[in-house]
Amino acid sequence: MSSAVPASESPNSPSNRPEADQNDDQETELLSVSWNQDYGCFAAGTSSGFRIYNCEPFKEMFRRELKGGGFGIVEMLFRSNILALVGGGANPEYPPNKVIIWNDHQCHCIGEFTFRSDVRAVKLRTDRIVVVLDRKIHVYDFNDLKQLHLIETLANPRGLCCLSHHPVNLVLASPATHRGQVRVEHFGLKVTKLISAHESHIACITLTMDGLLLATASTKGTLIRIFNAMDGTRLQEVRRGLDAADIYSIVLSPNVQWLAVSSDRGTIHVFNLRVRAGGDDAPDQHTVDGDSLIMAGQNPSASPSPLLASNTGANANSSLSFMKGVLPKYFSSEWSLAQFHLPEVTRYVTAFGAHNTLKIIGMDGR
């Protein structure tokens, strides 16, 4: 059950609350960090407001400091002034079951949604607002705030959900109603695809910008799998490690050449992907039938199955991988080609920057 309220000036809006002393950083608790859709910016929700940062070059773009108002979710819409805000912390600015769609340039509330349970996540694209609850996902039209879809999920305390951001391919991925299963909604095609990704519960998911590729990890945290989001075909499997880990983030590089994973083990793993969307020479070409997915180095016309091709990746393999099918699966795994070691004291999320660089944010504020 939810209610949506159109544009109004909220009495508790960030513009109408007195600003706190901006030198109180030592008393400010970081509650959340989230990338914008192209990973060029990120938002930080704190116990007394929120801050928006540009990544390259790194600088603080603006902040809204309040006397005691915390934000547990701050979701950007690319580089626009539109934000989705949800209260958080010991003294939330808004109830944790309410979503405020905020125009920071006009200091104006575009709309708000109120639910019977706490909001786990909010995802935005230019034409949709997606609100994730513990067992439901609500999809709204951005123009009139009317609900378009309601998706049932398993218990989803992590708020797992991801959206494509291609103007034509509107794709949403989320946990399904069965353990280890991912539900992929292709709204433009009116097609729902259920993918049995893991035996354990889903811990992390991500889509490429065009919605053609899906990457997943389970609560076991040892394997990351990449799927064709259209037909559910498993295209590649890489191994983070042998011991269980809590996966914090999975990210695919814009050119779909690399995949990075962060976990509670304090190591960022980077893998080479053997799958390309549209080929290396056509990063801006997209289709909705999955035919643009090809393996690296392959000419689609040279093989009847462009999704199956030789491994041109540079991921590490066991010296015993030639005995695949005889030794346990562990020995034939693809391992990361690079690792970055960080202190195991905080949660990290990562993204790819320009020129094959990584951007890493820690919940300790670094």
Image (spheres, rainbow, N blue to C red):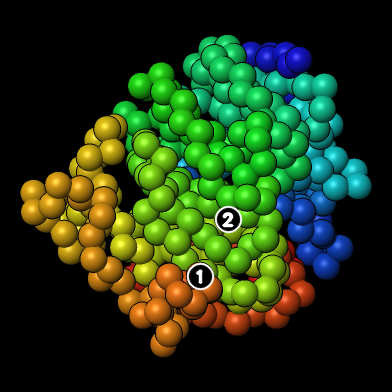
**How far from the left and from the top, in percent, is residue 326?**
45, 75
> Callout 2: helix, strand or loop?
strand
Front residue of 128/316: it is: 316
Q: Is residue 141 left or right of residue 364?
A: left
Front residue of 162/152: it is: 152
**How far from the left and from the top, in percent, is residue 110?**
61, 22
Which disc is residue 217 wearing? 2
**How far from the left and from the top, in percent, is residue 226?**
43, 53
Q: Is residue 112 left or right of residue 54?
A: right
**How far from the left and from the top, in percent, is residue 57?**
45, 66
> Callout 1: helix, strand or loop?
helix
**As drawn, 251 above or below 190:** below
Residue lying at the far left of the rendered structure:
301
Residue lying at the far right of the rendered structure:
90
Q: Quadrant of residue 71?
A: top right
Residue at position x 52%, y 21% from top? 142
N-terminal-most mark, 1 or 2: 2
Label 1, residues with CA under 10 Å away: few <14, some 14-19, many ≥20 = few
